[in-house]
Image (cartoon, helix red, strand yellow):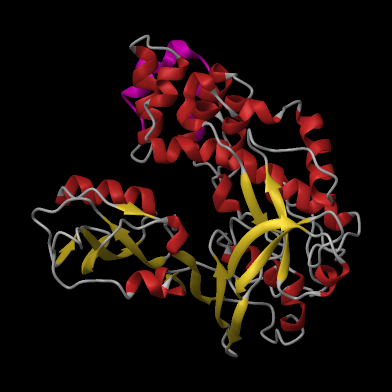
Amino acid sequence: MNNISIPKIDQLAGIQCYCTHFNGIHGLIKQNNEGFRVSEVIDESFLNNLSSIWDTHHRFPLYILNTRSIDSNHALFEIKKELGIRLKVIGIKDAKAVTRQYASSEQTKNIPREAKTQHTLLTLKGFTKIPLRKSFLNGNEFTIAIDNPKFSDISAFVPELKNIANFYGLQRFGSKRMITHLVGREIVKRNFKNAVELLLSYSTEYDSSISREVRGKCRDPKNYSQVLKQLPKGMDIEYQVMSTLVKGEGHIAALRSIPITIRRLFVQAYQAYLFNKCLSIAILSGENVLKGKEGDLCFEMEDPIIFGRIRRINSNLDLASKKIVPAIMLVGYAFQRGKGRFELITQKIMQEEVISAKDFYIKEMQELSTQGGFRQAPLCCRDFSYTNSLRLGFKLPKGSYATTLLRDLMKPEDPIRSGF
């Protein structure tokens, strides 16, 4: 929809187009943590059943987890290490942000009312009858500052908000090190050796000179023992993988040395890449992804950011309804061939990738198998507001990325250097 060229890194994530005609203000995001804030929006019915004290009916502690300069997975590791509390969260938050999310635990002893680690603050909210579930998350609320824009009048952008498609953001793929989906592809294709070698040796233009040197040495497995002694801080996953290989335990064991929450992201990122490609092709082919067509899958809307049951669009009444949103089937072992627009596109992409639905049932590592799922085609932004100093506020459904909205607003020439 716009003649502005698409950055190479976006294309590597399967994002091949913009969705608005707006020229873009450029600028920078995430210049400091305060400039990118996100808070979870939780189903009120879950919060209304809280008890202030523990009893046999309200057995599960529910915390407010505030983080700064750390992603959700590493925050949970830090809390377990420093406080001895094992927590579960229902949304993954980025490191370059100030975040507020909910966390639950099954521990019933030594429950702190408040506790801190280097990057986190835990505050006990109360006790629940059942543990926190993903189904209780409705969405996220964002407050974001854009610094150094070329211009600040975004009034022409606001009417086009509805046109933005629900692309997975670069964070889903590793941001400056776009590796996650590539590893996932090799796992799905059972090329476990390739997956490990990519994880250890793949390098990008954004890597530091030290990182490039280390990854260069990792191209030869004979160097693993030496490299282990000089790995920079932050390469904890690489350390686990190489240590396993040096012990002679094989490539599947090496992948399994990675924490399960991170390991699952590989296959999920490959799913996300296939989704982004499908959505890009649909838009570039002139398809309207905001409205369903006969034969498409759709969500029934229960609320502006809450999606209900999935079904086929099958009547003229549906096509005129504002209470349905087109849905795209994520590739997994339950993916079924269909005649809807997005399924036909996805089937063609799968042929090009030389994969089938059954490949996502990974018997060698069953914990990485994925059934699939559904995701809405449009972004579905709500309650958008902004100030003249370009401090934005808005809500998105769960699983949607604020950076997806920001890329169409800013249209950065180099997303990574712009803070994406």
User: Relative to 70, is 200 on the left or the right?
Assistant: right
Which residue corresponds to the image point at 85% horizontal and 51% vertical from the top-left?
341
Image height check: is 109 above or below 31?
Answer: above
Q: Quadrant of residue 40?
A: bottom left
Q: Position of residue 179 (x, y in %)?
A: 57, 37
Q: Would you say the magenta stretch is mainly helix, strand or loop?
A: helix
Which residue corresponds to the image point at 64% horizontal and 51% vertical from the top-left?
374
Which residue corresponds to the image point at 28% horizontal and 57% vertical from the top-left?
104
Residue 16 visible in the snapshot: no
In the image, residue 6 lies in the stretch drawn in magenta:
no
In the image, residue 230 lies in the stretch drawn in magenta:
yes
Q: Quadrant of the N terminus?
A: bottom right
Q: Quadrant of residue 375?
A: bottom right
Extreme residue toward the right, this view: 286
* Residue toward you, 190 or 62: 62
Q: Position of residue 212 (x, y in %)?
A: 51, 33
Q: What span is in magenta?
A: 212-231
